[in-house]
Amino acid sequence: MITCARRRFSSALLAALTLAVATPGRGEDVKLVDVVPRFQSGETTTDSEPNVAVDPANPHHIVVSAFTPCPPMISTVFAPIYFSTDGGDSWHLNCIVPGNNAAFGTGDITIRFAGHTGVLYAGTLNGSSFLELNVLRTANFAAPTPMTLLVSRSREDQPYTQAYEEHGSDHVFIGNNNLLKSTLLGGTGGQTASEDLSQDAASAAPPAGFGTDLLEERPTCGQDLPPVRTAIHDDGTVYLAYFRNEVGSPCFSGSNTADLVVARDDHWGTGGFKALTDAGDGKPGVRVASGLNITWLQNLGTERVGAQLSIAVDPKDRKTVYVAWGDGLDPANFTLHVRSSNDGGLTWSPSDLKTVVSATNPALAINREGTVGFLYQKLVNPGTCQGGGPGIACWETHFEQHRHHAWKDLAQPLANVPDNVSNYLTLGDYNHVLAVGETFHGAFSANNYPDKKNFHPAVKFHRHVDWVTHKLFADAAHTVPVSPSVDPFYFKVSD
């Protein structure tokens, strides 16, 4: 009897220990990779403002974009994307984006897969032509064939791409700031928040069905702030978020006064985004918050801040939507806010669900379980990172998850790196996170000073690196040292 009892106790203990290791929520599975390929170990450009796309039909196919010029021995005409076909373990550079600039590749660039078609879409500012919007696609992101140009239009800013495939049709949305309407730049109207969209963009000849919706119907101080962000539900509900610059605001001088507006369309954008009406003025789009002070292009550390914005819809419930933004009277007090709506954007939580001071680049996503993922980058001064010297501030890159009414950060930041790369686009105006099934995928930029204390323990570099001496090298023999710079990082988080 004693022997049997001991066996039962041992079996129960083993089962409990196994459960403790395997139960979701007790720990996270994290992958973190510097996506610069090994053959690029000698590069020192500021590869900031990254974006990420994951093929939902094959999540091993991942693409990252950033301010990266193509190596001149490969191309001087086409800028690169980074891509992986093995789930982010290894990375390659493919110069297929029209409009390469020798210093930074393209201007603003964002990328997205729609679904089972496997087509990759990009909205870019052409690196060789000032403020020229290009809408692009390729059916094979790993092939050397240049992306097809679908739309080219001048005087645009910050194109931001989202896409969703439904019954074989790729619905593609590219939010942008149409500066042809900016009275500050000699245009007319001053209502610049816009959306370029196509209902079936995968294979039709250029312009592949793309047309432009002007979203803003309120008067502005001369134009709207740059970001227009889109969130798509699989039933055809599409949300948009943008900043309206109030009449009388300084308008791109110091601090702007702005409204955060969320608009909605219930039929893939075919109705002109008029499903929500503001109770105050009867105009399309609900003003989630008004009188916001948006610090314009002033520095938080060495990084500029301006108009930061993100929006996400719950795949389980089209009426549940989250929005995040940044505001503040001065850079030191620039603050991120997260709020939500559970009635399709009609009303919003009266207070913040999450607030982060001295932070920038908010990015939201919601997985199929309804868990909210929140990526952001926080300046800590002085910081605890390595390699910056005494008193140097640090950029911490955090990824938090919200479920069961509570926020949970990773056990360690994805990155905690010195703020000592003197460039106002050290991080850029945005990063990105998305969800495929239960898994979150994201991209951010960070100082690549090689000390493992500065990164989540999962970190992996492809560059030639000596982690002991904390040095980067251009060659495998470690004879040609390379100065630290800014690299794009890919991460994946799953429970």
Image: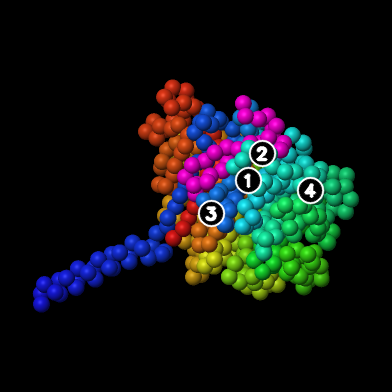
Tell me the amino acid under the disc marked 3.
Pro
Q: Which residue is mark 2?
A: 145
Residue beneath the point at 78% across and 64% down: 270
454 lies left or right of 140: left
Q: Which is more N-terminal, label 1 or label 4?
A: 1
Front in this rendered view, residue 29 or 178: 29
Q: Can residue 161 be seen here?
A: yes
Between the C-alphas of marks 3 and 4, the distance is 28 Å
Label 2 Cα crowd, 10 Å radius (few <14 / some 14-19 / many 20+)? some
Q: Position of residue 19 (x, y in %)?
A: 32, 66
409 lies left or right of 315: left
Q: Which residue is mark 4?
A: 206
Front in this rendered view, residue 174 or 89: 89
Q: Are marks 2 and 4 in contact (CB under 8 Å)?
A: no
Between the C-alphas of marks 3 and 2, the distance is 22 Å
96 lies left or right of 57: right
Above or below — where is 127 with respect to 480?
below
Front in this rendered view, residue 91 or 480: 91
Which image quarter is the N terminus in? bottom left
Q: Can residue 416 be seen here?
A: no
In the displayed image of the protein, which residue is found farthest to the left? 2
Tell me the amino acid under the disc marked 1.
Asn
Q: Which is more N-terminal, label 4 or label 2?
A: 2
Q: Nearer the viewer, mark 1 or mark 3?
A: 1
Tell me the amino acid under the disc marked 4.
Pro
Q: Which is more N-terminal, label 1 or label 2?
A: 1
Label drawn at residue 140: 1
